[in-house]
Image (spheres, grey):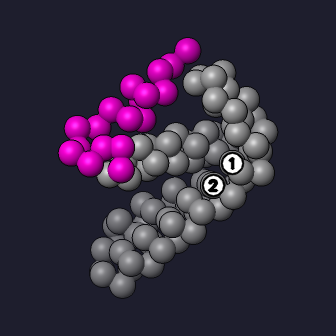
Amino acid sequence: MLDFAEDFLDCDCQSNPHCGHPEEKFVSYLLDLRAQGLGPEAIVDVMSDDYLVYAYPGDVLSFLDDGIRTLEAAEQLADVDGQQEQAGAIRRRRKNLSG
Ligand SMILES: [Zn+2]
């Protein structure tokens, strides 16, 4: 079993845990599982195996939707900003997630 606090709440920011990094790390953990092809219910299974935390598959699904929307926004920003390489990397990541 992995340690939830150690993996997600370990940053050195003064404002930790209100700095936003714990959420970012947790979202990226979920997005990685999704990118491996897991559906919401399988993600909940892995999550409870790894960390003994439980979430509703519906919550995970809306979490992932939010994540994908965040990536879309980041991609558009990078496009507007002329950062083609970064936009491309984000686009690939997003395509992985949308399955
Ligand atoms: Zn932080």
Above or below: residue 54 compared with residue 19: above
Above or below: residue 80 compared with residue 65: below
Report x, y in % for residue 13.
23, 44
Residue at position x 69%, y 33% in the image: 54
Q: Residue furthest bottom?
A: 80
Horizontal placement of 59 versus 67: left or right?
Answer: right
Above or below: residue 89 compared with residue 38: below
- State if disc 1 and disc 2 touch (CB < 8 Å): yes
| Quadrant in the rendering for residue 40 | top right
Image quadrant containing the N terminus: top right
Q: Nearer the viewer, residue 1 or 73?
A: 1
The amino acid type of the residue labelled 1 equals Val
Ligand 1 near label 2 (Cβ, under 8 Å)? Answer: no
* Label 2 SS: helix
Ligand 1 near label 1 (Cβ, under 8 Å)? Answer: no
Other-residue count near label 1 (Cα within 10 Å), few / some / many at <14 / 14–19 / ≥20: some
| Residue at numbered disc 2 | 63
> Where does the magenta region start and end?
1-18
Horizontal placement of 6 versus 58: left or right?
Answer: left
**Residue 32 appears in the figure:** yes
The amino acid type of the residue labelled 2 equals Phe
